[in-house]
Image: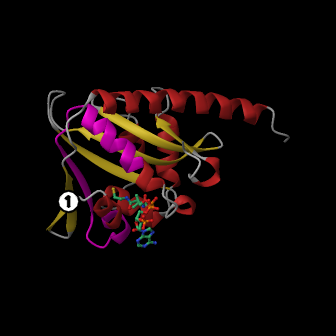
């Protein structure tokens, strides 16, 4: 299911209690990636405060894990109240794992989740010179509109269906099973 991901990595949703792992991942981003992720320079403290809200209501983070360490993430935030139909997504992939299809897989998962949450309008904000992010958004036929040096990619996920709900549930179960297997195999790996 996820065989094509680099280094045997897996993608699953972040669980509550994993905000420290998210903080550490965001703080490990190289300077350029951190700048692109937050559309500007942000300190470690700001990153830590941001990560602490990652498992709150209306936030779903899909993580890309390699050997149990979070190396990439797609953060979906509902905008406004929980009854809202708009959301925003932001991506962060640590440099060695960029350009290996992780962003594509994370966006696919995020779109499915957004669809199943009734989101009809999903924004992606990125700097105008972030070609890779724009290429990624284009793969999913996002309409891009330029605004003061930043790009807002707008995607309209189709409405949820029984099949899309099932696909998300299967992904979630697969994520839990993979995480358990991976943790077990690390226990038995020679030091
Ligand atoms: C932008 C980002 C999310 C893209 O994820 P990724 O895993 O590197 O991208 P993918 O490997 O899935 O590639 C997506 C598309 O981008 C294009 N692409 C890949 N590498 C590229 C490169 N080096 N230069 C230009 N375009 C590139 C390709 O069209 C690719 O699709 P394809 O392989 O089907 O042709 C990731 O690089 C990242 O986190 N960067 C730092 C933070 C950031 O920029 N966040 C975005 C703002 S929120």
Q: Residue furthest right?
A: 190
SS at mark 1 in the image: strand
When the figure is inspected, residue 44 is found, relative to residue 188, above or below; the finding is: below
Quadrant including the C terminus: top right
On the question of residue 11 being in view, the answer is: yes
Q: Quadrant of ligand 1?
A: bottom left
Give the number of callouts.
Answer: 1
Q: Is residue 122 left or right of residue 167?
A: left
- Residue at 55% x, 59% y is 97
What percent of the width, then of the height, locates residue 8? 64, 48
| Range of magenta residues | 106-134
When the figure is inspected, residue 104 is found, relative to residue 74, above or below; the finding is: below
When the figure is inspected, residue 89 is found, relative to residue 101, above or below; the finding is: above
- Residue at 67% x, 30% y is 181
Q: Is residue 29 left or right of residue 189?
A: left
- Residue at 43% x, 40% y is 62
What percent of the width, then of the height, locates residue 122? 21, 47
Residue 130 lies in the magenta-colored region: yes
Give the residue number, with chain letter if any, for mark 1: 152
What percent of the width, then of the height, locates residue 134? 30, 65
């Amino acid at each position: 299911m996820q065989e094509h991901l680099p280094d045997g990595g897996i993608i699953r949703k972040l669980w509550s209690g994993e905000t420290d792992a998210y903080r550490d991942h965001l703080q490990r981003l190289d300077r350029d990636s951190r700048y692109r992720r937050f559309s500007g320079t942000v300190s470690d403290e700001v990153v830590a405060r941001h990560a602490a809200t990652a498992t709150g209501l209306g936030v779903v983070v899909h993580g890309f894990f390699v050997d149990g360490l979070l190396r990439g993430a797609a953060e979906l935030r509902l905008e406004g109240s929980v009854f809202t139909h708009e959301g925003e997504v932001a991506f962060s992939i640590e440099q060695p794992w960029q350009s290996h299809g992780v962003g594509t897989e994370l966006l696919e998962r995020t779109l499915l989740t957004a669809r199943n949450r009734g989101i009809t309008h999903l924004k992606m904000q990125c700097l105008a010179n972030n070609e890779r992010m724009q290429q990624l958004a284009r793969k999913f036929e996002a309409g891009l509109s330029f605004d003061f040096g930043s790009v807002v990619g707008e995607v309209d996920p189709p409405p949820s269906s029984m099949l899309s709900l099932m696909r998300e549930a299967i992904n979630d179960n697969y994520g839990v099973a993979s995480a358990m297997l991976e943790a077990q195999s690390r226990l038995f790996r020679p030091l």
